[in-house]
């Protein structure tokens, strides 16, 4: 009987520990850190005629919705823009550029969506625009001209920069997930 009680107590404690573990796992993996920025994503996606599910996938991949993200390549904010790109976008929008504005979530998303639309217009391919967003448009142009990118999905294995190879896969995976969960998870207040 004592063995049975000990086993029962052990199983009860184990169940509580597992429950708490699952709760914290879900809490840390599925946080609502996207909510403050969804209005900007929707606004500037619509303004630039972009799929907000795709822009959300870019933001999730780039910064995990951390407005203070700062990479070793000096990319900043939610959409991880380098100052050079921010300066170019500001000039296209006929605005004065200030580096500190890249930390502002609305400005960062406005500039990032504008830049992504520019890449989409340049390459006429969502996938190439995604790759160019990470590896730069000059690299993508060189890979197209050099026959590395020919329009086939299998070409992505030939991309000479591993980070860009991984990036297109991550964004596409998140984008495909967003197509299923967007209205439930991202748009739900």
Image (spheres, helix red, strand yellow):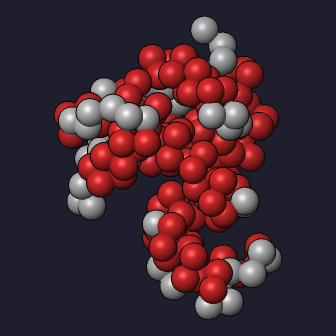
Residues 169 and 42: in front is 42
- State the residue at coordinates (47%, 61%): 134
Which sits in the foreground, 152 or 172? 152
Expressed as whole percent of the image width and height from the top left, the position of residue 103 reads: 27, 33
Q: Is residue 9 left or right of residue 83?
A: right
* Quadrant occupied by the N terminus: top right
Q: Give how far across and how far down residue 60 sits, in percent.
A: 51, 41
Query: Residue at 59% of width from left, 82% of height from top?
Result: 143
Direction from residue 97 to residue 11 in the image, left or right: right
Q: Is residue 174 above or below residue 153?
A: above
Quarter in which the C terminus is drawn: top right
Left or right: 129 with respect to 18?
A: right
Q: Residue furthest front?
A: 94
User: What is the quadrant of residue 146 in the picture?
Assistant: bottom right
Q: Is residue 64 placed above or below 145 in the rendered structure?
A: above
Say whether residue 7 is visible: no
* Image position, residue 162 (x, y; %): 48, 77
Tell me the residue at 58%/21% (across/down).
Answer: 43
Closest to the observer, 89 or 15: 89
Looking at the image, can residue 107 be seen? yes
Q: Quadrant of residue 177?
A: top right
x and y percent of residue 61 in the render? 50, 48
* Front-most of residues 108 and 20: 108
Furthest-top residue in view? 189
Q: How many marks?
A: 0
Q: Please say if 103 is above or below 122.
A: above
Residue at point 78%, 35% (across, down): 180
């Amino acid at each position: 009987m004592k063995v049975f009680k000990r086993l029962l107590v052990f199983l009860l404690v184990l169940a509580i520990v597992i429950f708490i573990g699952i709760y914290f796992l879900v809490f840390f993996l599925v946080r609502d850190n996207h909510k403050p920025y969804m209005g900007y994503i929707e606004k500037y996606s619509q303004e630039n005629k972009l799929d907000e599910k795709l822009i959300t996938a870019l933001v999730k991949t780039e910064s995990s919705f951390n407005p203070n993200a700062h990479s070793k390549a000096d990319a900043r904010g939610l959409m991880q823009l380098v100052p050079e790109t921010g300066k170019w976008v500001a000039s296209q929008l006929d605005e004065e550029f200030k580096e500190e504005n890249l930390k502002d979530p609305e400005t960062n998303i406005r500039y990032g969506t504008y830049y992504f639309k520019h890449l989409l217009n340049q390459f006429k391919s969502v996938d190439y625009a995604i790759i160019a967003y990470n590896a730069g448009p000059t690299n993508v142009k060189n890979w197209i001209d050099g026959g590395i990118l020919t329009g086939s999905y299998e070409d992505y294995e030939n991309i000479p920069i591993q980070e860009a190879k991984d990036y297109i896969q991550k964004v596409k995976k998140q984008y495909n997930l967003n197509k299923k969960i967007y209205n439930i998870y991202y748009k739900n207040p």
